[in-house]
Image (tube, rainbow, N blue to C red):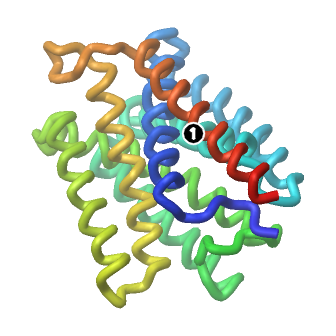
């Protein structure tokens, strides 16, 4: 049985909420609580492995488990990216390039091993491992790319979110109106929702003096987590009705 949700509008709304929550929760752990990028990354990778084990053992799509893994990859991706870009000193541009090459390598290996990188049917063990590896890397890449757009490019948090949001609209139009590969367009959209979440998360958390809305990491995380709980509950209700 397929162990991932259908790619409907609700999936993308939940993906953006989860990735934005990953940005605010990662900053909450590493910056607000002052745990640091390195230790936060280790703790969150452990959380990712724990949630992933539950996902691998499940026999079908379980909303609570699936979105727990998505949140853990997004939160870990935030701190890993910050650790590479800031603590190690790669910088946002080099960090984005390195992670882009790593993601491309994983997708090519997946394509070679399985014959496709389509996510319409993730049920075998091999495809699951590639799927979650690609997601973890793409969420890490999204943080670096979002920070690059918000800081190095001079667009700011709002400008970065607007640019990526526009790109996502274009990809959506191409998905329905063009003959381009739906698999390619999916991965482009999946990758870009992460920097959108990163820039939008920074827009929520940063002070008004820094160009943000001033909700802080606590307030933003609570808002986004509450929204995601409502959406996961909706998924559970739909699943019960269909069964």
Q: Is residue 77 above or below residue 238?
A: above
Depth check: give the residue in front, 39 or 147: 147
In which quarter of the view is residue 48 placed?
A: top right
Q: Which residue carries the number 1 mark?
A: 231
Q: Is residue 94 left or right of residue 40?
A: left
Q: Is residue 151 left or right of residue 147?
A: left
Residue drawn at (19%, 46%) of the image:
162
Q: Secondary structure at mark 1?
A: helix
Q: Is residue 13 left or right of residue 59?
A: left
Indicate the position of residue 92 as horizontal and vertical percent values. Answer: 30, 44
Q: Is residue 106 above or below residue 209?
A: below
Indicate the position of residue 8 as horizontal and vertical percent values. Answer: 51, 62
Indicate the position of residue 89 as horizontal and vertical percent values. Answer: 36, 36
Q: Quadrant of the N terminus?
A: bottom right
Q: Is residue 80 left or right of residue 132?
A: left
Depth check: give the residue in front, 127 or 166: 166
Q: Quadrant of the C terminus?
A: bottom right
Residue drawn at (42%, 85%) of the image:
181
Residue drawn at (31%, 35%) of the image:
200
Q: How many marks?
A: 1
Indicate the position of residue 54 as horizontal and vertical percent values. Answer: 83, 45
Residue drawn at (54%, 25%) of the image:
226
Which residue is situated farthest in the left direction here?
154
10 Å crowding of disc 1: few (<14), some (14-19), many (20+): some
Which residue is situated farthest in the top direction here?
33
Depth check: give the residue in front, 35 or 48: 48
Depth check: give the residue in front, 134 or 224: 224
């Amino acid at each position: 049985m397929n162990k991932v949700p259908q790619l409907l509008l609700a999936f993308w709304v939940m993906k953006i909420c989860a990735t934005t929550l990953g940005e605010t929760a990662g900053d909450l752990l590493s910056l607000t609580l002052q745990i640091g990028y390195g230790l936060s990354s280790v703790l969150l990778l452990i959380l990712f492995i724990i949630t992933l084990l539950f996902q691998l053992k499940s026999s079908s799509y379980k909303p609570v488990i699936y979105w727990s893994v998505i949140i853990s990859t997004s939160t870990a991706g935030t701190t890993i990216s910050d650790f590479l870009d800031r603590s190690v000193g790669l910088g946002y541009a080099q960090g984005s390039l390195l992670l882009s090459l790593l993601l491309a390598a994983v997708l090519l290996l997946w394509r070679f091993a399985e014959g496709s990188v389509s996510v319409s049917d993730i049920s075998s063990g091999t495809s699951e491992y590639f799927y979650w590896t690609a997601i973890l890397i793409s969420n890490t890449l999204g943080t670096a790319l979002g920070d690059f757009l918000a800081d190095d490019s001079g667009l700011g948090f709002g400008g970065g979110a607007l640019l990526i949001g526009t790109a996502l609209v274009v990809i959506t139009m191409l998905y329905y109106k063009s003959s381009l590969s739906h698999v390619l367009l999916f991965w482009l959209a999946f990758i870009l929702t992460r920097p959108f979440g990163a820039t939008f998360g920074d827009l929520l958390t940063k002070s008004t003096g820094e160009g943000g809305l001033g909700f802080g990491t606590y307030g933003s995380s609570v808002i986004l987590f509450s929204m995601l709980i409502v959406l996961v509950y909706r998924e559970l209700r739909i699943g019960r009705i269909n069964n």
